[in-house]
Amino acid sequence: MEKVRARLVRAAKALEDAGIPYAIVGGNAVAAWIARVDAAAVRNTQDVDVLLRRRDLAAAAAALESAGFVRRRAGPLEFFLDGPAASARDAVHVVYAGEKVRPADCCPAPAVSETVRNQAFRVIALGALVRMKLVAFRDKDRVHLRDLAAAGLVDARWCARLPKELAARLRRILATPEG
């Protein structure tokens, strides 16, 4: 976990020092929000997901490479390995703001402006994170949503703020807290 945290902080610092708008998303964003309420309830995650504007990719790549990351691409996926011998699991993965992660997604990823400042980095706002998790809706996303609900950060009142499809998904999560 310490290596992941160091990778996250190093990547965020490189982006901030270069003046590049970004937000930490994914499991590390969930962890950051849950830590505000109950640090003991935080789950570990191995990779770092960062939200960037596509137009900032070249500048972000230069900043991350200067911090020791190695740029790689696998099909449509863009990521930065934590050194030349690292695996894709030891990487910073890019999610593009305002674009769908998968073509079938009902909603695009949020804007990088939907962030709040955490201790050492910018994290996606809670509402935007919940939407991202509901759009992706993989097993790990459902677990993350249940964790957010268990921490008291998400409840049935959120359904009124969401598009119909996402509200239905959240209702299912809240109805099955144990999975």
Image (cartoon, helix red, strand yellow):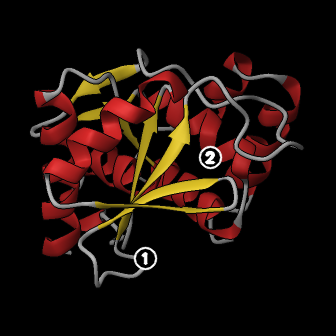
Quadrant of the image for the C terminus? Answer: bottom right
Q: Quadrant of residue 7?
A: bottom left
Tell me the crowding category of disc 2: few under 14, some 14 to 19, or many 20 or more residues within 10 angstroms, Cα based: many
Quadrant of the image for the N terminus? Answer: bottom left
Q: The disc labelled 1 sits on which kind of residue?
A: Arg
Q: In the rendered view, would you say 48 is above or below 63? A: below
Judged left or right of residue 86, residue 9 is left
Q: Nearer the viewer, mark 2 or mark 1?
A: 1
Q: Quadrant of residue 3?
A: bottom left
Compare residues 134 and 121 and report the one nearer the observer.
121
Regarding residue 37, the answer to whether it shows in the image is no
Q: Which numbered marker is on residue 133?
A: 2
Q: In the rendered view, would you say 103 is above or below 2? A: above
Q: In the rendered view, would you say 179 is above or below 173? A: below
Regarding residue 38, the answer to whether it shows in the image is yes
Tell me what residue is drawn at x 45 percent, y 36 percent.
Answer: 51
Cα gap from disc 2 to disc 1, whole angstroms:
19 Å
Instruction: Indicate the position of residue 27 as horizontal and vertical percent values.
Output: 43, 57
Q: The disc labelled 2 sits on which kind of residue?
A: Lys
Instruction: Indicate the position of residue 164 as horizontal and vertical percent values.
Output: 87, 26
Tell me the crowding category of disc 1: few under 14, some 14 to 19, or many 20 or more residues within 10 angstroms, Cα based: some
Q: Are marks 2 and 1 in contact (CB under 8 Å)?
A: no
Tell me the residue that label 1 is attached to. Answer: 89
Tell me what residue is drawn at x 72 percent, y 18 percent.
Answer: 160
Tell me what residue is drawn at x 68 percent, y 50 percent.
Answer: 174
Instruction: Indicate the position of residue 69 as horizontal and vertical percent values.
Output: 25, 60
Q: In the rendered view, would you say 117 is above or below 3? A: above
